[in-house]
Amino acid sequence: MTERIVLAYSGGLDTSVAIGWIGEATGAEVIAVAVDVGQGGESLETIRQRALGCGAVEAYVADASDEFANEYCMPTLKANGLYQGHYPLVSAISRPVIVKHLVKAAREFGATTVAHGCTGKGNDQVRFEVGIQTLGPDLKCIAPVRDLALTRDKAIAFAEEKGLPIETTKKNPYSIDQNVWGRAVETGYLEDIWNGPTKDIYDYTATPEFPPAPDEVIISFEAGVPVAIDGVKVTPLQAIKELNRRAGAQGVGRIDVVEDRLVGIKSREIYEAPGAMALITAHKHLEDITVEREQARFKATVGQRWSELVYDGQWFSPLKRSLEAFIEDTQKYVSGDIRMTLHGGQAIVNGRRSDTSLYDFNLATYDTGDTFDQSMAKGFIELWGMSAKVASGRDIRVAGQ
Ligand code: ARG
């Protein structure tokens, strides 16, 4: 029986050419698998037809947009997941869900190998292959761009020679990856890190310099997850989409950073994640009133470590799972409403309310009604400073000898 290979298919030039390229290099039949993670753009049926037109024996489209929102974006929100304090893990969280569907398709179609279109310089190859090793340890993995020398020029030449139904002339100098959680743009002109991004780079966000009138939004959460916007019930996917639209119109969520890739390269990245950044901001502010101080401080460290694991392709690792058990426990009381104003590139919280809040007006107030016994502070401070005071006494004594 002819060997079968499942290819992670985006519909773009490289993966379209990869169908025939893999076929010629290996003699295998190629099954193209596209996964909908809310990336928008072309219809999935168009993408499916193109894969067949490029020589795939089967083309299969998996609708994973709700699954992606529920099982990948929501854990990121609960962790306030920002790699290096900036990047909401847009591409990093989409790879494991894509892998899940690739492995499922490999089983359904009797494939022995999974292929992806990543280069040898990025994080995504690691995320794909580590994921495949974990979910389908018997499956082999190939990357035509990296392992079968499929460069861009060769891809264009191949497409023209074979008359493939794909545009080869449109010159987009950027490498773009997008889904409902955000959009990542890299390479080309952006590789000079002094160059400011030009307007044409952005798609999810309008320019924040000339914003429309301020937009006030109330986001309601239950146990760390958004459940309503302005009182209207929403699913996680709907919440992200609605905030992509509203925060995007105000230019919220543009990010320009140089980040540390897993492979040891520093790289310039432009992200736009209006919905994700508005949600993370609101969620963090709700945690500020509902999570106890020591839990909250420790959770910031846990969230950072969680983000590094996810960035580094360890979505299926035991440590990540253990950290999630902790994060999940902290979310029990993260319920309530956050009111925020979206305007001119910013999402600023200006009101919060929660039935599970730890904010105690009577303890906090400086007005009458104060229930806090201020006389307790004096002794507390004496003891709090005791250890450092004893050490400082020793330092002076030793210095004087
Ligand atoms: N640097 C980001 C990451 O590693 C984004 C990668 C985007 N991928 C792409 N093919 N443009 O998660």
Image (spheres, helix red, strand yellow):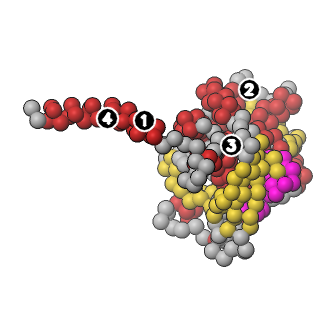
Along the viewing direction, whichever of 59 and 29 lies nearer the viewer: 59
Disc assigned to residue 136: 2
Q: Secondary structure at mark 4?
A: helix
The residue singled out by tag 3 in the image is: 357
Q: Nearer the viewer, mark 1 or mark 4?
A: 1
The single residue placed furthest to the front in the displayed view is 368
Residue found 84% across the figure and 54% down from its top: 231
- The span picked out in magenta is 229-247
Residue beneath disc 1: 380
Q: Nearer the viewer, residue 208 or 369?
A: 369
Horizontally, residue 381 falls left or right of residue 228, namely left
Q: Is mark 3 within 8 Å of ligand 1?
A: no
Residue 68 falls left or right of residue 211: right
- Assign the magenta stretch its main secondary structure: helix
* Few, some or many residues within 10 Å of mark 2 (<14, 14–19, 20+): many
Q: Residues within 10 Å of mark 3 (few under 14, many from 20)?
A: some
Q: Nearer the viewer, mark 3 or mark 2?
A: 3
Q: Which one is earlier in the sequence, the residue at label 3 or at label 1?
A: 3
The circle drawn on residue 388 is 4
Circle 4 or circle 2, nearest the eye: 4
Q: Residue 393 location in percent, x, y?
A: 22, 34
Mark 3 vs mark 2: which is more N-terminal?
2
The reply to whether callout 4 and callout 3 are in contact (CB within 8 Å) is no
Determine the CA span between mark 3 and mark 2. Answer: 44 Å
